[in-house]
Structure formats: C-alpha cells, structure tokens
Amino acid sequence: MNRYRSLLVCFLLTSVSHTYAQHFSLSRLFYPNVTLKADYNVPSSLDGTRDYGVTRSGFYGVIPIQSEVQLGYSLKKKLDLRAVHTVMLAQFTQIQPTIDGKNVPDNGYKTLSVGVLRLQASIKDRLWVYGGGLGVTESNETFFSPQPFFWGGAARMHILGLRTQIIYGSAITYNQKLRFVPVFGINKGLGHWRISALLPFMINANYKATKWFNVDMLAGLNGYSGGFQIQTPDEKMLRRENYRQIKTGIAANAHLFSAINVSLEAGVTTFRQLRTFNSARENLTSHTPATTPYIGASVRYITSRSGFSSRFIRKLGLGQTGVNW
C-alpha cells in the first residue's frame, strides 16, 4: 500500500470544485475537520450605471463514515485486498449579492449541500475515487420550493515517477440542465514547489517555505445559481440568477498550535457573467461585471486524534508526524 502514498495527494483534486476556495490539502479529506470561510468581492461596474458586489461566508465539514481494509473481489472477479475510506461532506454558505450597495435579494442566497466521497485503493484495481452529492441554493422566499443541484463522478489515478501523478475521469452535474464534464488532473512535485490542477476547474502552485508556512498561487472557476422571487400586485414571479467568475490570487497559509490552519487570500475576479432567467428558463438579462479585487480568509480546525481516521491513514502508509496541511 505504500506505493499509493504519493497518489493520494492528487486524489483530493476531485473534490476541489465543490469545496474550498483556498489551497488543496491532504488532511482536509483524510481527517475530520471543520472550516469557516469568507470572501468579499469589491463592488464594480455592472452596466455602466450600477455597481455589483458579492460576499460569501459559511462553513464546510468532513466526517469520516467508513475506514477499513477489506478482502473482496477485483473488477476482474479475482480475490483482492483493498483499503476503503468514505467521508461525508457537509456545507452551508450564505451568499449576498449587492446592487449599488443594496442587498438583492434582501436576505441573499443560502446554499445547503451534502455529499459522499469514497477512496478505494487495492492491489489489483489500483486507486479509484467515487463521489456524489446534492444541494440547493435559494433565497428565503424560494427555499421551500427549491430547484436542487447534484453532481457525481468517478476517476482513476496513475503514477508517472515518484513525484508525478495524473487523474482522469468524468463527472455528471445537474443545475437547471444536465451536463457531462470530462476531468483531467495532475499533481507534480518540483523541489519546494507542488503544481496541482483539476481541469477545467482549478489550478494551483504551492510553495512550502517552512513546516508551518506555505504560499499558494491559484486560479479557479466558481459561482452560484440561486432562486429568488419578485412580488407584484398581481402575482409572485420566480426567477433564477446565475453568476460565474474566474478567480486568480495568492493565499498565505499558516499552521497554528496543534490543529488550526489559517489562510488569507487576495487577488482579482475576472471573466464575470451575471444572468437572470424566468421559470421557463428564458434569459431575461445578461451582464458582464467589470474585473475587481477580492479578499478571503478561512480558519480550519483539524483533529488527528480520531482513531477511526488514524487507523486508515496508518494502513495506507500515511501515518506521519508533523503538520497535516
């Protein structure tokens, strides 16, 4: 199982697009943790006469639900020894868009989502990753009549030398329409540097300055799709707002005490698009907000004292002393 140690770093890329804005982290997947995060986009021109801004805040949790070594059968129906690790992902995010400083909608959007990721490492079938999840992003007025989203996928890992791994697979997502997304990832170590990417979602270059401090240079695609309601004297009209952007920035990450990681991030958001649809999914408005700076921060509490997770880490040869980034 020791040969899988280097592969596992790249595995975490499969959950990046549904998890963290900051750097990739091995401990975020293999140890129980809770992350508090927030970011703020400086308001910028929406259409030449109005300014658009957005803030996010929330938490994210990883809860191990299975961790063991099993004796079973491979895909070719041959006896095989495999290690499995399954975690549940839980997320809550408050998204607050603004137009000229006014909250629109008044109480913003709330995202609630849950998911499951499963790692299976075996002698014959090598390393596979499976995952899926669902959730909603709605305003207070539409929260009890939501349009849910879901995602699911699988990926295979390969090793190309001691410090290079690739991952390839596919994902299916549904958010108003069904999409099939091919996925390719790479994880490459170069001295104190590590280059990680999950295309088409994110790319990251990490420099480990010391055992307690590292820096990330990152770029990623993200956004939201939230439901809201317009009240007129005659009726209530349901609307949907879709927003997407590309973030490029730098994050400074510090490990404090024995189980707390703090990240501060700054950069710009660009290639932004804001669109509004009616209940028939007809496009009503389309805007391209100007490029703008952003800042973000996160605090993550990690506990490596869980016997449930620690036993699995030792079985895969990952039990090491030091900082769990």
Image (tube, rainbow, N blue to C red):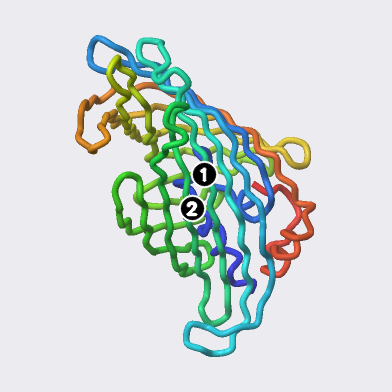
* Whole-percent x, y for residue 170 in the image: 37, 61
Q: Is residue 177 above or below residue 261?
A: below
Left or right? Give the position of 255 relative to 183: right
Q: Residue at x 49, y 32 (%)?
A: 110
User: How many numbered circles are shown?
Assistant: 2
Foreground pick, 260 / 186: 260
Residue 280's place in the image compared with 121, above or below, is above
Q: Secondary structure at mark 2?
A: strand
Front residue (pair 111, 215): 111
Compared to residue 4, the image places residue 255 above or below, namely above
Residues tagged 1 and 2 counted as in contact (Cβ below 8 A): yes
Residue tagged 1? 113
Q: 153 or 196, which is in the foreground?
A: 153
- The label on residue 133 is 2
Circle 1: element type: strand
User: Could you give the CA–CA distance between mark 1 and mark 2, rounded to whole angstroms?
Assistant: 7 Å
Residue lying at the far front of the rendered structure: 234
Q: What residue appears at the point 51 percent right and 29 percent down from the top-left corner?
A: 94
Residue 66 to residue 100: above or below: below
Kind of residue at badge 1: Ser
